Amino acid sequence: MRAHVILYVQDQSRSSAFYEKVLVFRLRLDVPGMSEFEFGEECVLGLMPASGIKRLLG
């Protein structure tokens, strides 16, 4: 089973750069609206702009 953890952030590009440095992992996905880091086969960390959650939840 794979766990997906999503953090809603104010600034996706700044947050992506920060987590790349802190985690010492490269992004596996970096598109407008979502950035992802993969930790083996068990866990994915996603970064999504906070404004995106408003659209999803209405």
Image (tube, helix red, strand yellow):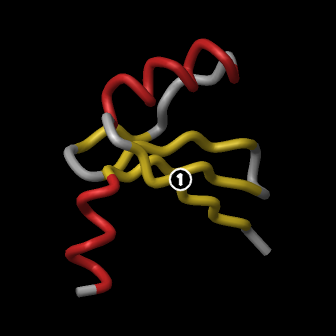
Q: Nearer the viewer, residue 46 or 26?
A: 46
- Circle 1: element type: strand
User: In percent of the image, x 41 and y 45: which residue is there?
Assistant: 9
The amino acid at mark 1 is Leu
**Left or right: 58 as drawn, with respect to 26:** left
| Residue 46 horizontal/vertical position (percent) | 51, 51
The residue carrying mark 1 is 7
Residue 18 vertical position relative to residue 58 in the rendered view, above or below: above
| Residue 16 horizontal/vertical position (percent) | 44, 28
User: In percent of the image, x 63 and y 60: which residue is there?
Assistant: 5
Q: Nearer the viewer, residue 2 or 54?
A: 54
Q: Say how many tags the image has.
A: 1
User: In percent of the image, x 52 and y 19: which residue is there?
Assistant: 18
Residue 13 vertical position relative to residue 21 in the rendered view, above or below: below
Crowding around mark 1 (Cα neighbors within 10 Å: few <14, some 14 to 19, many 20+) is some
| Residue 36 horizontal/vertical position (percent) | 48, 45
Residue 2 vertical position relative to residue 37 in the rendered view, above or below: below
**Left or right: 40 as drawn, with respect to 4:** right
On-image quarter of the C terminus = bottom left
